Image (cartoon, grey):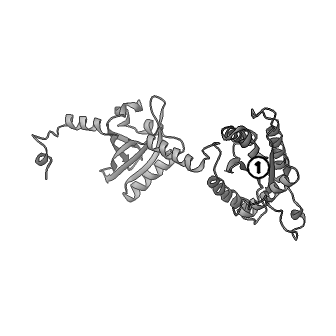
Amino acid sequence: MTPSDVMPGRVDTNASTLAVLAERLPGVIFQLYRHDRSGQLCIPHLAGRGTHLLGLSPDELAIDARPALERLDKEDYPRLMAAIESSVRWMTPITAKFRLRLGNGRTVSVALRAHPSPAETGVLWHGMLMDISEQVAEEARLRKLSSTDDLTGAANRRKLMNRLDEEVSLSNRHATPLSLMILDLDHFKRVNDTWGHLRGDDVLRNLAILCKQTLREEDLVARLGGEEFALLLPLTPLAHCQAVAERLRQSIAEYDFGLGEGRVTVSIGIAEHRIGETRDMLIDRADRHLYAAKHAGRNRVMATTTRDTNPDLPGQPGRPGEQSLATK
């Protein structure tokens, strides 16, 4: 069935009509040509809504595609070139996503799909470009939601466990130091009972900010739930981690959380990864050190327990009704 069988009147397929159609498409249609001998790329045809945003002359691109290719993000450029080479070799379509700088300085995320066909002296692709910036932004938002604690903006438990798996694996393979802090607010129930849960939420948010300000960009601050946080410090030995923990404990104790005379303090348990140790074993040791800090009077950092020096002794008891973080 031809278009004229389903559309009223005569179907106009002249160049002007096709140009109008191209301008109304939600993307850019193009031809890309690669010369066999020189390997030079050019764009003989470029049409559609948004082509002017490149700020490049179509006549210039018809001779040399490099001005457009130079707009690619430096990390994406080699991947697109590799995709083109693979398409030339196997005559398979190019499917790629990359970031492209427009003539107005804005960077957009673009999806490209193009089908190759042999030409007299090279390869000619017919393809389409689509701006997928909104889709990429939405995917990033959803990824952030899936790994971020809603209340504090810190990483959530899932993010922590995934990162712990990665860092423990690296530490086991390369014998690099890795330390973990587990931090718990002291007597946090009193804050909620005295000032209300909204003020308690403010305390948790400010606590997360203080933790992030104390740590490096490559470290991870995660909320485990309630008033308990974990801080992961890659490439950090125990002695350095202990100094950071003490500095953090002191800054929290001195911070004005807006609770009048009430002072907010934390107890911190820390542990350094041992070669061959699993993620849960590291968590369990840091957890036991946290409980030891609580039993020793709170508002302190604990890096060792009696069991660390005498493994035949039973582990430190947890807080009433609680299990180790590795199992609860």
Quadrant hosting residue 285? bottom right
Q: Amino acid at mark 1?
A: Leu
What residue is rendered at 81% in x and 48% in y?
A: 267
What residue is rendered at 87% in x and 63% in y?
A: 308
What residue is rendered at 76% in x and 57% in y?
A: 176
Q: Position of residue 43 (x, y in %)?
A: 36, 40
> Where is 165 relative to 196, above or below?
below
Q: Position of residue 154 (x, y in %)?
A: 65, 45
Q: Nearer the viewer, residue 147 or 261?
A: 261
Determine the secondary structure under disc 1. strand
In the rendered image, the residue lying farthest to the front is: 193
The answer to whether residue 45 is left or right of residue 154 is: left
Image quadrant for the C terminus? bottom right
Q: Position of residue 287 (x, y in %)?
A: 77, 57
In the rendered image, the residue lying farthest to the left is: 9
What residue is rendered at 83% in x and 52% in y?
A: 294
Residue of label 1: 183
Quadrant hosting residue 192? top right
Q: Residues within 10 Å of mark 1 (few under 14, many from 20)?
A: many
Could one spot residue 157 in this view of the protein?
yes
Q: Position of residue 41 (x, y in %)?
A: 40, 43
Quadrant hosting residue 263? top right
Q: Nearer the viewer, residue 210 or 69?
A: 210
Could one spot residue 56 in this view of the protein?
no
Q: Nearer the viewer, residue 165 or 198?
A: 198
> Where is 171 relative to 156, above or below?
below
The answer to whether residue 286 is left or right of residue 95 is: right
In this rendering, the count of numbered labels is 1
